[in-house]
Image: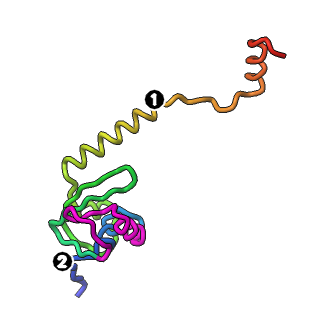
Amino acid sequence: MGGRDVPDELRLDKWLWAARFFKTRSAAAEAVGGGKVHVNGQRVKPARAVRPGDRLEIQRGVERYEVVVRAINDRRRPAAEASTLYEETADSLSRREQLAESRRLDRLAQVESGGRPTKRDRRRLRDALGKH
């Protein structure tokens, strides 16, 4: 009596939301409509039904995911459960790790300026240049 039937297919935007790729269904629908999500290599609409075995390419900001749908759930569950709905390909995972590492190195390489010089710094600079 407490059991619930889980559908064997689900709207793409609802699945993306349940799998926690997007915070809201409307954000998921907007991404699909904007061509940021492809199913089996084709651009689709948000109402497209997804089934286990479908291959999704999801562009979210600078990150790009390639996942295979493993299960369907029409309810948003905790992240640990949501991650069981899909399996990320090895290529996708390694590409995202490389991107994260390069972003980390870029942040380390940036020179931090102290911002605007203080009044004391400006006086020292003026005196060093011999200007009054």
Q: Could you tell me which secondary element the residue under label 1 belongs to?
A: helix
Specify the segment rendered in magenta. Answer: 24-47
Left or right, 98 with respect to 30, comes to left
| Number of numbered discs | 2
Point out the tag, 2 or 1, that comes first from the N-terminus: 2
Q: Could you tell me which secondary element the residue under label 2 belongs to?
A: loop
- Tell me the crowding category of disc 2: few under 14, some 14 to 19, or many 20 or more residues within 10 angstroms, Cα based: few
Residue furthest right as drawn = 132
Please identify the quadrant where the C terminus is shown.
top right
Left or right, 39 with respect to 105, comes to left
- Closest to the observer: 100 or 77? 100
Q: What label sits on residue 8 in the rendered view?
A: 2
Please identify the quadrant where the N terminus is shown.
bottom left
In the image, residue 24 lies at what x, y percent?
42, 69
Task: Give the answer, above or below, for where 95 lies relative to 17.
Answer: above
In the image, residue 103 lies at what x, y percent?
40, 39
Query: Residue, x 26% and y 75% (percent of image)?
Result: 48
Query: Residue, x 34% and y 67% (percent of image)?
Result: 32
Task: Give the quarter of the image for residue 76.
Answer: bottom left
- Closest to the observer: 93 or 46? 46
Verify whether residue 25 appears in magenta: yes
Q: What label sits on residue 109 in the rendered view?
A: 1
